[in-house]
Amino acid sequence: MLRINRDKCGYCGTCVAVCPEDALELIDAYLSLERDCIACGICARACPLGALEVVHEE
Amino acid sequence: MKNKYDMLVVGGGPAGALAAKTAAEAGNTVCLIEKRPAIGTPIRCAEGIGKECLFEFIQPDPRWISAEIERARLITPNGTSVSLEQENPGNVVGYILDRKIFDRELVWQAAEAGADVFVKTRATAPIMEGGAVRGAKVMATGSPADIRADVVLAADGTEAQFARWAGLDTTVPLREMMSCAQYLLTDIDIDAASTDFYLGNDVAPEGYLWVFPKGDRTANVGIGISGRKSRDGSRAKDYLDRFIAKNFPGGKTIEAIAGGVPVCQPLPCTVADGLMVIGDAARVVDPLTGGGIGNAMYTGKLAAQVASKCISAGDCSKAALMPYDTEWRASRMGKSLERNYRVKEFFITLNDKKLNVLADSVASVGLAEFSVSALIRELIKRNPRMLFELKALKDALQ
């Protein structure tokens, strides 16, 4: 699953544009996981601020 | 808000504003929606624009000009500073805008021309009928509504989700997404008439770090690095913080922003049935400089001109809208995007040593014309021993 650190997020939308699944959406100033995330981690790489983290649950 | 317009524009940046203004002036009913509660804020931009790019659309106004630029300096990994100016120094070659005011001015002009404008109103889905876009479902400050239109212009910037929902693939590959961070720093020593670009793989891998003046002792200090170089501990913000600690330790941050700049090639096609894509959403950012304001205004205006004819003729099919796509590709902007993409692909292959050699060779060059192609011609002329490496650059010019 994708963990969004809202204290770090700059609500810039960089993650939205690189998501291959169109799972993320920036609703005004709130980053929202709207559709199924495949935990590929591309958004976490692209984030300029390090606000996203893919967490693999056991 | 009416439920039917000739044109719906999704996004209130420079592309959307120019489109709405142009279409309204041509006598169309136009609706522009912006998902944020205010036009122009928060900005995601270093705010630089070339003089000609700006003059083509609007005359400069001190209310939204933060600084007049006379030169650009490239600072290479070994610290060499290459100053690029016109042959007559002192000429203004570009501007740093105050986008918060500038964007409002553009949208105000669209409104004055007759366009309806709604903020805190976001598109949630295109209205599709028989494969064609016929408007958008929107959420207007919490109330759902349908806005139908003969043609929808997607001007939703980097995120570019509207075109994606309508079936165009706007996803930016990680390596071609510049991951950016910027501070508005004040109380720092800068050259208030110079845009400074810091290059090098330790400074900004596959990108650059910029210092763009916003006044005598204030600047947008920002950085873009390739998404594929971005990792924990070496993200855009980390590089930027290290640079500032070293170069502007006394600077005070009065604004901190982040953003993504797509430096990929433009969308393979920027029209579909009932849909046109403009500005950053169409991926028409200059892949070398990351500049997008001028290209956004150009594509916004052109799209609205073509759309106006199609609306009058009662045909907004993909084929009817295609002249927009064809025309911008053949334009000076289209050619320059193609060339600068190749130039960018060349420069990201250079190690710091080669960057130093190239930069040293053009130190203190006076350019007759302040442009990328003039600089590249000088680089080729002055580095005969790097002929083989520079072949890619030479080819890009043709």
Image (spheres, coloured by chain):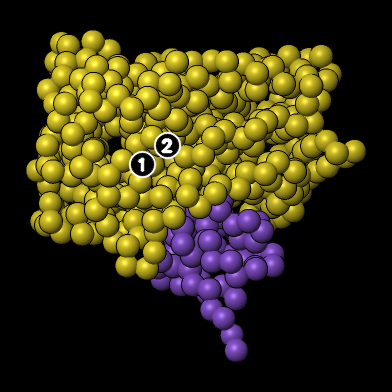
Chain colours: A purple, B yellow
The residue at 83%/20% (across/down) is B315
Q: Chain of mark 1?
A: B
> Which is nearer the eye, B160 or B170?
B170
Q: Which residue is mark 1?
A: B349
Rendered position, B351 above or below B242: above
Kind of residue indicated by mark 2 = Glu
Q: Which residue is mark 2?
A: B345
The residue at 65%/68% (across/down) is A38
Rendered position, B238 above or below B137: below
Can residue B192 be seen? no
Q: Are marks 2 and 1 in contact (CB under 8 Å)?
A: yes
Residue B360: where, in percent of width, then height?
14, 30
Image quarter of residue A20: bottom right
> Which is nearer the eye, B376 or B395?
B395
Number of on-image labels:
2
Residue B277: where, in percent of width, then height?
64, 33
Which residue sits furthest bottom? Answer: A58
Left or right side of B30 for B92: left
Rendered position, B228 above or below B261: below
Image quarter of residue B217: top left
Residue B134: where, in percent of width, then height?
81, 36
Q: In which quadrant will I find the N terminus of chain A?
A: bottom right
**SS at circle 1:** loop
